[in-house]
Image (spheres, rainbow, N blue to C red):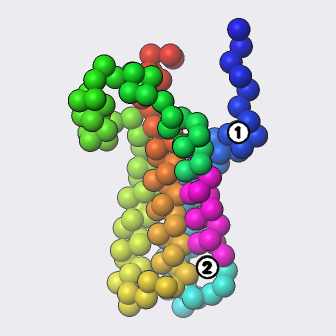
Amino acid sequence: MTSPRPSAFARTADWLGSKIAVLCTVSVSVALVSVALGISHSVAMYVAAALMFLIAQVFILRWMFGRGMRSIADLGFGSNRQALKYGLSMKGFDRSLMVAAVYSFGATLFIGFLDFAQTVSGAMLLSFASFGAVTQAMRLNRFWPADTAKQ
């Protein structure tokens, strides 16, 4: 018996999830450069921030109606305690996504101080939206004990 073919939305979300570390790194770098160039309040920065926010929404929807709807037993845990210990120890995350998340979080703090705490600047919103998108992708791309048992 073959497994069901994922929908076009699921394939798109998975493809986007595989590229999000690079996309996040580029967008945060653009945000940092825009502050240095003085164009952090440009319309293009606000549009890029809105696009990154929409990408995060794609990951949230994919998680809610896809991989996120599995029980603790389906994830490969015998008890809630094991699942909590696994989650709190930050196991199963993709390293490149973790690096991108730390980079975007640090850049968000840096832009906040560099741009004189103007939280409405396009650069700040782009950096923060990139952080949100990459953290949502981290949840979507996380490896669970049941996933390693299938390989």
Q: Tag 1: Cα neighbours inside 10 Å, few (<14), some, or many (≥20)?
A: few
Q: Main secondary structure of the magenta part?
A: helix
For residue 45, the mark is 2
Marks 1 and 2 close (CB-CB < 8 Å): no
Along the viewing direction, whichever of 24 and 138 lies nearer the viewer: 138
Q: Position of residue 52 (x, y in %)?
A: 60, 64
Q: Is 87 situated above or below 57?
A: above
Along the viewing direction, whichever of 122 and 78 lies nearer the viewer: 78
Q: Tag 2: Cα neighbours inside 10 Å, few (<14), some, or many (≥20)?
A: many
Q: Amino acid at mark 2?
A: Met
SS under mark 1: helix
Residue 13, by quadrant, is: top right
Q: Is residue 124 visible?
A: yes
Q: Is residue 32 left or right of residue 47?
A: left
Q: Position of residue 111 (x, y in %)?
A: 41, 79
Q: Amino acid at mark 1?
A: Arg
Number of numbered callouts drawn? 2
Of tags 1 and 2, the one toward the viewer is 1
Residue at point 50%, 38% (across, down): 68
